[in-house]
Structure formats: structure tokens, C-alpha cells
Amino acid sequence: MEIHTRHYNDVVILSVTGRLDSETAPQLLQTIGEQITAGVIRLVCDLNKVTHLTNGGAKALVEAVRLTQKEGGDFRLAHVQVQVKYVLNLTGVDGMIKIYSNVVGATASYFPGPVPGER
């Protein structure tokens, strides 16, 4: 799994590529922890290039929400592919995490005004 990080104002966008499972989940959580330590508590996770999500990966996404909300922030998903959306639905995680059709909508949701792409 690869994670690329970019910033938009005080929001961090994590673009994840590859598999998100129990083996790779610690890498994602470590990256999120580093962002929180740096004072960034509003994150968007772009799952456009995630090819496979398991129960272990879904649990990591829930943990990401918990960690950011504990600090007064939030964790949102964007560009979730069909096969990944299926696992999120199957595990019930889709009801716990805000999901947006694209990164722009997810990022904009942190700012006042209408939110493009919210489901």
C-alpha cells in the first residue's frame, strides 16, 4: 500500500493506493497519527486507487474516525470504488463514516456553504 499526502488549507488529503487490509492498516493508522500529532485533525481519505478492502481495513477506517473525533476533528472518505463500497456496506462502516463521491466534495464539506458530491 502507498499513501500520498497533500494539504488543502488545514485539511490533509491521504491518497491510498493498493490493498487496505489487516497487514497494511497499521501503516494508514500511523500516517493518521502523525498528522494528528502535527495538529491536523481534519482528514480526507481518497480511496480511488484502493483495489481491495478487508474487514481489518474497514476497522482501521473506523479507528481513524475515532482518533480524529477524539481531537475535535473528523475523517471522511472520497472516491470509494464499488467493490470497496460493498465491504463498507457489508460491515456497517458506511453508516459510521461520511462518504463523498470525490475529494473536492469531501474537502469542501469542512468549510461553510453547500457541499458538492455529498451522498
Image: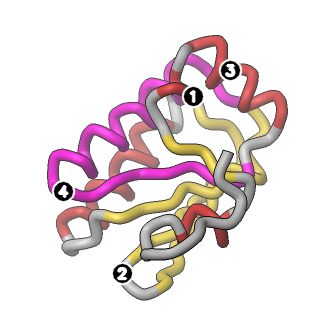
Q: Any magenta on residue 102?
A: no
Mark 2 or 1 closer to N-term?
2
Quadrant occupied by the C terminus: top right
Q: Position of residue 67 (x, y in %)?
A: 24, 44
- Disc 3 on helix, strand or loop? helix
Give the mark count: 4
62 in relation to 55, above or below = below
Give residue 72's mark.
4
Which residue is label 3 attached to? 87
List the residue tagged with mark 2.
10
Q: Amino acid at mark 2?
A: Asp
Inspect the magenta stretch and tell me whether residue 55 lies in it: yes
Q: Earlier in the sequence, mark 3 or mark 4?
A: 4
Task: Quickly name the residue at label 1.
Answer: 94
Q: Tag 4: residue type?
A: Gly
How many angstroms separate mark 2 from mark 1 (CA)? 25 Å
Gap in Å between the C-alphas at discs 1 and 3?
9 Å
1 vs 3, front mark: 1
